[in-house]
Image: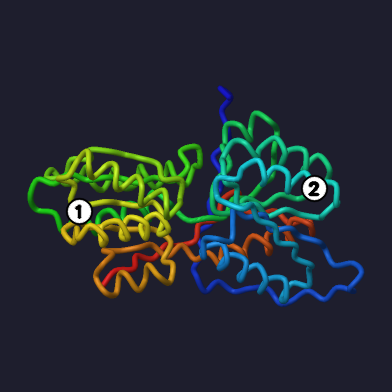
């Protein structure tokens, strides 16, 4: 873990990047590519599957979609990958629920000859290096920048001393860490803001409702909350509405349909579109290219878009 690593090359792509022509393959030789996601209870991952299904149609592969029950069901994700190793799929495109726990099983998959592509949440780079998991491209967005933009949308409305809460995702997930850091960076730029709590609600609506309830009872002067995904933002909004707290500014992350509606009617200050469908599409596309022996960028960043009024 103390060894130095080469700096990865980074590709910045545009949302409307050109896709390759569909590849014609006989039905009995179609590569089998598995998309392993955290859950389908979050519409973000339904969008990711939609993009992957488009790639399936265009690129002539067989897509196998597997998800855990919840975003916190890390052991279930590991079991899914173990099953895929036994099934001898050609490639696994994985959005890991945790940045460290899945590395060993993905290393076993790679040793079995299975191509690995990492999307959405980055695998822990030090552990990947230590375990010898090599040649795994990463596709996502700049989560620090996205969270910074969403938190800044709150910050620019604050002109008097204000207490703020940050609701983060799973604390061992790199995208959760990055979003917390991005939000804290934006809030630190405003001398009127004091962040009084950083709490995990594990990406969940119900847990965000409960954490918001507890923290606001401890800190009733909180007037702004950054939520690291829209599911948590929706849980927070539910609590605020039930308790008639219209004085609290809230921002989210993911641009889910319900969050977009909340932005349009002023209940939510902002959210971030990280193009889940594009991540799913590119994940499958990269798997196909790796199977064909192509060399790909170590990291591909899809631009985020701030959604506000």
Q: Is residue 305 left or right of residue 153?
A: right
- Residue 304 versus residue 14: which sits nearer the camera? 304
Residue 180 image label: none
Q: Quadrant of residue 89?
A: bottom right
Q: 189 above or below 33?
A: above
What residue sits 38% from the left and 50% below the top? 208
Asked if the residue under mark 2 is in contact with the one under mark 1, i.e. CB atoms within 8 Å, the reply is no
- Residue 155 versus residue 304: which sits nearer the camera? 155
What residue sits 19% from the left and 47% below the top? 222
Q: Quadrant of residue 11?
A: bottom right
Q: How far separated are the C-alphas under marks 1 and 2? A: 46 Å
**Where does label 1 land, which residue?**
155
Q: Is residue 121 left or right of residue 199?
A: right
Residue 127, horizontal then vertical, whole percent:
61, 32
Image quadrant for the N terminus?
top right
| Element type where label 2 sits in the image | helix
Image quadrant for the C terminus?
bottom left
What residue sits 26% from the left and 74% below the top? 265
The total of numbered circles placed on residues is 2
**Where does label 2 land, which residue?**
83
Residue 162, horizontal then vertical, whole percent:
13, 46
What residue sits 37% from the left and 71% below the top? 260
**Crowd band around label 1 with a 10 angstrom C-alpha radius: few (<14), some (14–19), many (20+):** many
Marks 1, 2: nearer the viewer = 2
**Crowd band around label 2 with a 10 angstrom C-alpha radius: few (<14), some (14–19), many (20+):** few
| Element type where label 1 sits in the image | helix
Which residue lies most toward the top here?
2
Q: How is the image coloured?
A: rainbow
Residue 134, horizontal then vertical, whole percent:
69, 40
Which residue lies most toward the right here?
28
Residue 230, horizontal then vertical, whole percent:
40, 59
- Residue 55 versus residue 74: which sits nearer the camera? 74
């Amino acid at each position: 873990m103390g060894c130095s690593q080469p700096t990865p090359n980074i590709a910045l792509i545009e949302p409307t990047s050109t896709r390759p022509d569909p590849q014609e393959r006989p039905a009995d030789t179609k590569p089998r590519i598995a998309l392993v996601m955290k859950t389908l209870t979050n519409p973000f991952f339904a969008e990711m599957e939609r993009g992957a299904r488009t790639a399936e149609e265009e690129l002539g592969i067989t897509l196998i979609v597997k998800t855990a029950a919840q975003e916190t069901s890390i052991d279930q994700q590991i079991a899914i990958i173990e099953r895929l190793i036994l099934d001898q799929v050609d490639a696994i495109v994985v959005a890991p629920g945790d940045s460290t726990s899945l590395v060993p099983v993905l290393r076993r998959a790679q040793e079995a000859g299975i191509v690995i592509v990492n999307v959405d949440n980055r695998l822990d780079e030090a552990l990947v290096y230590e375990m010898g998991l090599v040649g795994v491209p990463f596709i996502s967005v700049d989560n620090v920048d996205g969270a910074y933009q969403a938190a800044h949308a709150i910050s620019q409305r604050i002109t008097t001393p204000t207490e703020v809460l940050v609701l983060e995702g799973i604390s061992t997930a790199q995208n959760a860490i990055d979003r917390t850091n991005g939000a804290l960076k934006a809030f630190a730029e405003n001398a009127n803001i004091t962040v009084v709590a950083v709490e995990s609600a594990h990406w969940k609506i119900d847990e965000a409702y409960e954490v918001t309830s507890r923290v606001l009872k401890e800190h009733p002067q909180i007037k702004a909350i950054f939520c690291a995904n829209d599911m948590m933002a929706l849980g927070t909004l539910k609590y605020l509405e039930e308790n008639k707290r219209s004085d609290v500014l809230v921002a989210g992350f993911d641009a889910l349909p319900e969050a977009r509606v909340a932005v349009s009617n002023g209940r939510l200050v902002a959210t971030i579109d990280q193009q889940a469908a594009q991540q799913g599409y590119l994940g499958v596309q990269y798997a196909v290219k790796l199977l064909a022996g192509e060399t790909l960028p170590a990291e591909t960043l899809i631009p985020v878009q701030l959604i506000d009024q």
